[in-house]
Image (cartoon, rainbow, N blue to C red):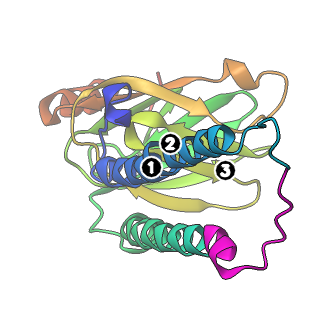
Amino acid sequence: MIENWVPALSSYAKDIDFVFDVIFWIVIAFWFLLVEAVFLYLIVRFKKRDGVPAQYITGEIKSEKNWVHYPHLAVLACDVVILFLAIRVWYDVKQHVPPIDETVRIVAQQWAWSFVHAGADGRLDTTDDIKTVDDLHLQVGKTYAFKLESRDVLHSFSVPVFRLKQDAIPGRVVTGWVKPIATGEHDIQCAEICGIGHALMPARVLIETPEAHAAWIASKGVSGAGE
């Protein structure tokens, strides 16, 4: 359902969406509606009636306890299903790193995003690196590792179309990966309140075809000059 509003443009985005969909259908479509239906039934069934005294229920009778035991067990079963799916996706995204084609450095600061792309040689930290501010250029179908850093305070690198959100922590280099699966230009956000200019540090990810990406790299030359 999420993809109806925000497209899923990374190789693992739909897996993450599936977990959210399962949670929605279990929590909202099943449990919420069931609980509200039972609640309304009990209101009508045990409403005040003239000449009928109120009942004091202690919950000591087994049939009364079952109103707690059975839903409790059912909730636990649903939790196990959700936990299993979440751990599987977590492992695929965070633990099972596929072969990496290229690495990009992402640097957060108050209040901008800086990116260091590999140049024509495809390797980071060489003389032809390309530095940009607020524009991240990626090639569709290529698997990227990222090195995420912060120069000052806690930030959070969020790309909704990738279903990617990762904190940038001062003094640490946080690693991860992403594989774009469709071209386009989309938002990058800081999802952590990082100061008075927090709302003023949006950026863009430009997912390009191999030809367009190669042309962009060529346009920067070998000097590594930024935009």
Residue under numbered circle 3: 168
Residue 171: quarter of image: bottom right
Q: Is residue 221 visible?
A: no
Check if mark 2's residue and mark 1's residue have beta carbons within 8 Å.
yes
Q: In the drawing, what numbered circle is on residue 33?
A: 2
Callout 2 secondary element: helix
Instruction: Say which of 41 and 130 sits in front.
Output: 41
Residue 60 within the segment the image draws in magenta:
yes
Residue 136, given in percent of the width and then of the height, sits at: 43, 33
At label 3, the amino acid type is Ala
Q: Residue at x 67, y 81 (%)?
A: 62
- How far, Cα to Cα, is label 3 from label 1? 37 Å
Residue 59, given in percent of the width and then of the height, sits at: 78, 72
Residue 111, given in percent of the width and then of the height, sits at: 72, 27
Q: Is residue 69 above or below residue 193?
A: below
Check if mark 3's residue and mark 1's residue have beta carbons within 8 Å.
no
- How far, Cα to Cα, is label 2 from label 3? 39 Å
Q: Residue at x 41, y 47 (%)?
A: 25
Residue 144, given in percent of the width and then of the height, sits at: 34, 53
Residue 78 within the segment the image draws in magenta:
no
Residue under numbered circle 1: 30
Q: Which residues are magenta?
A: 54-68
Label 3 or label 1, whichever comes before in sequence order? 1
Foreground mark, 3 or 1, reads: 1
Left or right side of 109 for 182: left
Q: Residue at x 86, y 61 (%)?
A: 56
Left or right side of 148 for 2: left
Instruction: Say which of 172 and 56 sits in front.
Output: 56
Callout 3 secondary element: strand
Callout 1 secondary element: helix
